[in-house]
Amino acid sequence: METIFLKLGGSLITDKTQVETVRADVLTRLAAEIAQARRENPALRLVLGHGSGSFGHVAGAKHGTRQGVQDAAGWRGFAEVSDAAARLNRLVLAALLAADVSAVSLSPSASVGCVDGRIQTIASQPVLAALDAGIVPVVYGDVAFDAVRGGTIVSTEEVMMALAGEIRPFWLLLAGETTGVYDQSGQVIPAISRANYFEIEAALGGSRGTDVTGGMASKVQGMLALVDHFPQLSIRIFSGLEPGNLAQTLLHPSQAEGTLLHAD
């Protein structure tokens, strides 16, 4: 049975300009759309992840947790980042349950082992058990213990990609604020693969597509590396701000709006 990974971006479900502020109306609607898709397709196997937005990122930046933890103050920061990420996760779970989506939170800090900032081991069995039970496992960006750095932070994407090795999703759906990957004229690029990457590479460097994590070009490169590794996987970047879009994308990912990234 095909499994879909869905990530709700941190900037989609929180207001990044306000510390620890959820966009409650957006989160409530997205949860209702997930419920709708599950009603219309009861066989849908969904792994949900969400970004930390204005929750974990603030504490993480303050303490430099991703780079490593060496002393008591650093471990205090590690604990604060964990707490902030979990606070948002509880709000996401509450929204899902209120929308009648049976969901369970699986904290990456309890299941991930890192070496120098990279996930080396992850417990996929609880995620598979949740899917087999017909409930939605929910993961998120979290702190993790690290054999080299002491502690670090793992992103939602990193957690989902570590799970992909065992769970083998057919789709990774990335719901954000933008309607897809834009070209230089601000139009959505419908599809990206290795075959056309060089044609569109210049467009990805434009200011519309840059951000603190290295810009859209590095994100697209990372996603193409992912589909190189998992050729069955297709990735869609789409807007979660447009009402009804998430439900339709979950039900018909190959026909949905946005940018499709796929193997040649």
Image (cartoon, rainbow, N blue to C red):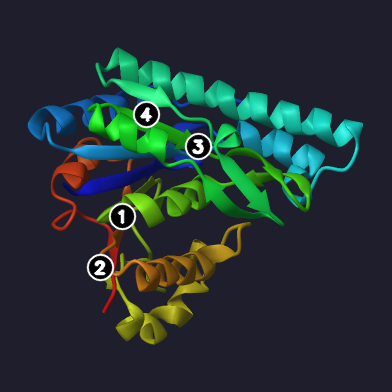
The span from disc 1 to disc 4 (Cα, nearest Å) is 29 Å
Q: Hey, which quadrant is residue 79 in on the image?
A: top right
Give the mark nearer the N terminus: 2 vs 4. 4
Q: Return the residue at label 2.
A: 190
Q: Nearer the viewer, mark 4 or mark 3?
A: 3
- Mark 4: few, some, or many residues within 10 Å (few <14, many ≥20)? some
Q: Return the residue at label 4.
A: 26
Residue sitting at x 44%, y 68%:
220
Above or below, 250 relative to 211: above
Mark 2 and mark 3 residues within 8 Å of each other at the beta carbon: no
Helix, strand or loop at mark 3:
strand
Q: Is residue 192 visible?
A: yes
Mark 3 and mark 1 residues within 8 Å of each other at the beta carbon: no
Give the mark nearer the N terminus: 3 vs 1. 3
- State the quadrant of the C terminus: bottom left
Q: Position of residue 196 (x, y in %)?
A: 32, 83
- Mark 3: few, some, or many residues within 10 Å (few <14, many ≥20)? many
Which label sits on residue 140? 3
Mark 4 and mark 3 residues within 8 Å of each other at the beta carbon: no
The amino acid at mark 1 is Arg
Helix, strand or loop at mark 2:
loop
Q: Return the residue at label 1.
A: 168
Q: Is residue 196 left or right of residue 247?
A: right
Helix, strand or loop at mark 4:
helix
Q: Position of residue 185 (x, y in %)?
A: 37, 72
Q: Position of residue 228 (x, y in %)?
A: 37, 74
The amino acid at mark 3 is Tyr
Above or below, 3 relative to 243: below
